[in-house]
């Protein structure tokens, strides 16, 4: 028995190559025909743009796509309308975008673009498939589009010292190149590249904008923005950059010095667009000549610059500090500071005290006023200290005894002094501007006890060495207030006018006068009386 089986071989599709014509420009019409040059039907034909299926949507929301058709004698064409279900990763094209897809034969499809533009540029692929396989062919469409403005440059204002960016953007295909040039002078048509004198720092950003990070007056003028891509004449736009000047303040010196009681003038200059306002401030308050008649302000214009002079008369210690010159106009504010230093004699020395004390000398010590003074004395160091002193009963006057001490020393040995004498001491500091007020007078408190100047009466036995009666002087308590006193010494002389008068067989009366006052060398604390009796010597001491 012979079995015969019929085997049917289905041939996969093959596409005849197709291409867009060269030199397509915006507004032209173009068409592609995708044809299966071989292969068994039925075919399914699909168009893709940049790898995504193209689905043409009509204005009523329905979608039109190519469908598979079976070859017949009448070669019918079929078109299906489906509900608007969005497929994934497809190119949706409105019918008014100018793209049409139609089946020409059962084995071919035509893609038509009625008016090409830049959005149509890309890679177009035709896929034809049957049960045996799939074939595809791709061709690219480049639509040459002349430049057109997306951001057209316009006139711009800028402020000196600030940055400015002037936008200039264009689209087209190929992508346009944007360049900037600066006009030379005021004559139109004469331009030069950026970077020459007057345009240092100006450059073109990646998006085509003209960028000047820090504007100067030299940047003012006309600028030409050009966009071209070789298609058509290109674009150009002339704009003007107007540069305004905010205020700039300058001072000749950052610090002024003046002696207390003198007058001083502070000056500042400002430039910038008018109107320009200048004022002075000190300690966060505006200087107002109506408030303090010692102030006066004068303004003048010299070579386009505004000059302001602040004059302060009879400067005092309270006028020291920072004076701020403030300038303002419609484009900003600026300021400059002048530190006013009021020079004056130094402060008086502090903490005057006795470091060491002797009978004929005293070592004084004190603290320098430099340690607690303000900056007004910083440029006027102490050159000398003047130590003045007097005896307590004297008065202060210009002829008091004094001792000069170098300004870097804060101790002084004062001598020669009288023993057991009360003195007043004070110290003054001196610099090239004058002498300080005197220091506080040295204060020391002491208690001393001494004898009165009464006569002494004593009695003793002639035969027996023992005391019968002693008539002593009466002790008195004395309170003494001292500023500073030297230590005492042994009296410089003996008692005067010593006399003895017998009062009886066992009693003598002894009288005397104290030494001269200048020989005491301190308070007299007592007397010593010595006597001799038949070869014996007895000593009686009183204190």
Image (spheres, grey):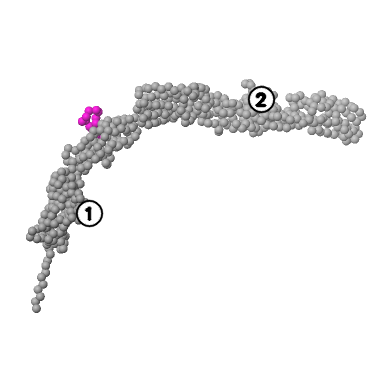
- Per the rendered image, the range of residues in magenta is 181-194
Tell which of 271 and 276 is nearer to you.
Answer: 276
Labels 1 & 2 near each other (Cβ < 8 A): no
Residue at the left extreme, as displayed: 73
Looking at the picture, how far across and down is residue 290, in whole percent?
47, 23
The secondary structure type at the circle numbered 2 is strand
- Give the label, 1 or 2, closer to the camera: 1
Point out the image quarter for the C terminus.
top right
Rounded to the nearest angstrom, the CA distance separating label 1 from label 2 is 119 Å
The secondary structure type at the circle numbered 1 is loop
Looking at the picture, how far across and down is residue 374, in whole percent?
53, 31
Total numbered labels placed on residues in the image: 2
Looking at the picture, how far across and down is residue 406, in whole percent?
57, 28
**Residue located at (87% from left, 31% from top):** 459
Looking at the picture, how far across and down is residue 78, in whole percent?
13, 57
Q: In this view, does 87 lie to the left or right of 258?
A: left
**Residue located at (13% from left, 55% from top):** 103
Residue at the front extreme, as displayed: 60
Tell which of 359 and 434 is nearer to you.
Answer: 434
Which disc is residue 84 wearing?
1
**Residue located at (25% from left, 39% from top):** 151
The question of residue 192 being in magenta is answered with yes
Tell which of 99 and 413 is nearer to you.
Answer: 99
Tell which of 520 and 455 is nearer to you.
Answer: 455
Q: Is residue 382 left or right of residue 225?
A: right
Which disc is residue 390 wearing?
2
């Amino acid at each position: 028995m012979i079995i015969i089986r019929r085997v049917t071989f289905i041939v996969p599709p093959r596409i005849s190559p197709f291409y867009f014509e060269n030199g397509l420009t915006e507004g032209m019409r173009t068409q592609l025909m995708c044809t299966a040059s071989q292969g068994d039907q039925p075919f399914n034909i699909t168009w893709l743009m940049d790898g995504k299926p193209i689905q043409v949507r009509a204005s009523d929301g329905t979608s039109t796509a190519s469908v598979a058709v079976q070859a017949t004698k009448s070669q019918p064409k079929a078109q299906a309308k489906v509900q608007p279900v969005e497929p994934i990763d497809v190119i949706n094209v409105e019918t008014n975008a100018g793209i049409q897809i139609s089946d020409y034969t059962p084995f071919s499809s035509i893609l038509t673009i009625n008016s090409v533009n830049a959005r149509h540029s890309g890679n177009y692929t035709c896929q034809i498939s049957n049960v045996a396989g799939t074939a595809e062919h791709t061709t690219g469409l480049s639509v040459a589009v002349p430049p057109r403005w997306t951001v057209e440059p316009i006139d711009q204002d800028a402020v000196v010292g600030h940055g400015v960016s002037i936008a200039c953007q264009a689209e087209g295909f190929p992508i346009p190149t944007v360049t900037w040039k600066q006009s030379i002078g005021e004559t139109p048509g004469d331009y030069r590249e950026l970077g020459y004198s007057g345009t240092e720092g100006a450059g073109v950003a990646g998006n085509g904008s003209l960028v000047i990070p820090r504007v100067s007056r030299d940047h003012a003028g006309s600028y030409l923005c050009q966009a071209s891509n070789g298609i058509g004449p290109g674009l150009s736009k002339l704009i003007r950059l107007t540069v305004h000047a905010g205020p700039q303040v300058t001072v000749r010196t950052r610090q002024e010095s003046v002696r207390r009681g003198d007058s001083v003038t502070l000056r500042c200059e400002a430039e910038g667009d008018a109107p320009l306002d200048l004022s002075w401030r000190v300690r966060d308050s505006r200087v107002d000549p109506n408030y303090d008649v010692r102030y006066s302000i004068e303004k003048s214009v010299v070579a386009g610059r505004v000059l302001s002079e602040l004059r302060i008369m009879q400067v005092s210690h309270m006028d020291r500090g920072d004076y701020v010159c403030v300038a303002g106009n419609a484009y900003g504010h600026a300021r400059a500071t002048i530190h006013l230093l009021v020079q004056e004699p130094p402060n008086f020395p502090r903490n005057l005290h006795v470091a060491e004390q002797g009978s004929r000398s005293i070592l004084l010590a004190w603290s320098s006023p430099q340690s607690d003074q303000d900056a007004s004395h910083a440029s006027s160091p102490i050159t000398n200290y003047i130590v003045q002193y007097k005896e307590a009963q004297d008065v202060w006057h210009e002829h008091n005894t004094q001792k000069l001490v170098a300004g870097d020393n804060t101790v002084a040995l004062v001598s020669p002094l009288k023993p057991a004498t009360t003195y007043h001491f004070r110290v003054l500091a001196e610099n090239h501007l004058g002498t300080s007020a005197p220091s506080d007078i040295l204060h020391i408190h002491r208690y001393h006890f001494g004898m009165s100047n009464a006569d002494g009466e004593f009695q003793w036995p002639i035969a027996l060495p023992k005391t019968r009666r002693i008539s002593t002087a009466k002790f008195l308590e004395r309170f003494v207030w001292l500023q500073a006193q030297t230590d005492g010494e042994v009296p410089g002389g003996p008692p005067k006018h010593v006399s003895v008068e017998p009062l009886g067989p066992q009693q003598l009366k002894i009288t005397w006068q104290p030494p001269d006052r200048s020989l005491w060398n301190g308070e007299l604390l007592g007397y010593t009386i010595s006597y001799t009796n038949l070869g014996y010597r007895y000593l009686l001491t009183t204190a």
